[in-house]
Image (cartoon, rainbow, N blue to C red):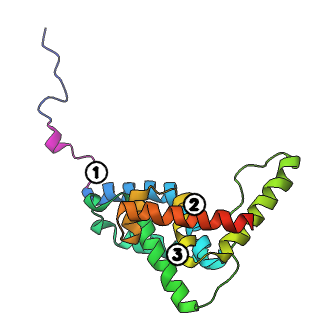
Amino acid sequence: MKAKRDRSQGVTTASTATLPAAAARALDFDALYRDARDDVFAYTATLLRDRAAAEDVTAQAFERAYKRRSRFDARRGSPRAWLFGIARNAALDELRRRKRAASAELPGPSSEPAPDEAAELAAQRDAVRAALGTLPARDRELIALKYHAELSNAEIAAVLGVSVSNAGTLLNRAMNKLREAVDA
């Protein structure tokens, strides 16, 4: 009886390349897009205080990131921090172009609360929205990076170009100003 021949015999990992490097990067970008698109929109909406402009800037930020995806360096920070840095620059470009301030519109909650809670949540949201409108742009940006983008202090520091401890201090001060504005 002849020995059963193994069809995979002589196959090495070097000869079974799964994906070219460019395709692997594209897959990583796809995952980054799916994970961060809503957060980038919320962040830009907070900075621009205009939902329509935020949609345009979000698209522009992802377009810029896609074109520059080969330049991403993991040693300099996480993909999310890199993406939010690009989104920040795109939003600042838009603000410079428009040179105007508009009222902030934040996305609503993702799930429907009970009717009795809805009125209270709406009042709280309105109070926070109004208080955010009284803060300087830098403080609004810090709060948006932390709570809309859900970036860590280290990632915020990378986006803003400051030290991690400075990012934490700036965020603490911004939150104190927000609390005072809400309570006023």
Query: For residue 148, which numbered disc appears in the image?
Result: 2
Which mark is nearer the camera, 3 or 2? 3
> Could you tell me residue 175's position as x and y percent?
58, 62
Does 60 sit left or right of 15 as displayed?
A: right
Q: Quadrant of the N terminus?
A: top left
Amino acid at the residue labelled 3: Arg
Q: Is residue 147 magenta?
A: no
Region rendered in magenta: 12-20
Q: Closest to the observer: 3 or 149?
A: 149
Task: Place residue 169 in its image quadrant.
Answer: bottom left
Q: Main secondary structure of the magenta part?
A: loop
> Label 2 neighbourhood size at 10 Å, few (<14), some (14-19), many (20+)?
many
Q: Earlier in the sequence, mark 3 or mark 2?
A: 3
Q: Secondary structure at mark 3?
A: helix
Q: CA distance from mark 3 to mark 1?
A: 42 Å
Q: CA distance from mark 3 to mark 2?
A: 15 Å
Q: Which residue is mark 1?
A: 19
Query: For residue 138, which numbered disc appears in the image?
Result: 3
Residue drawn at 25 percent across, 55 percent down: 20
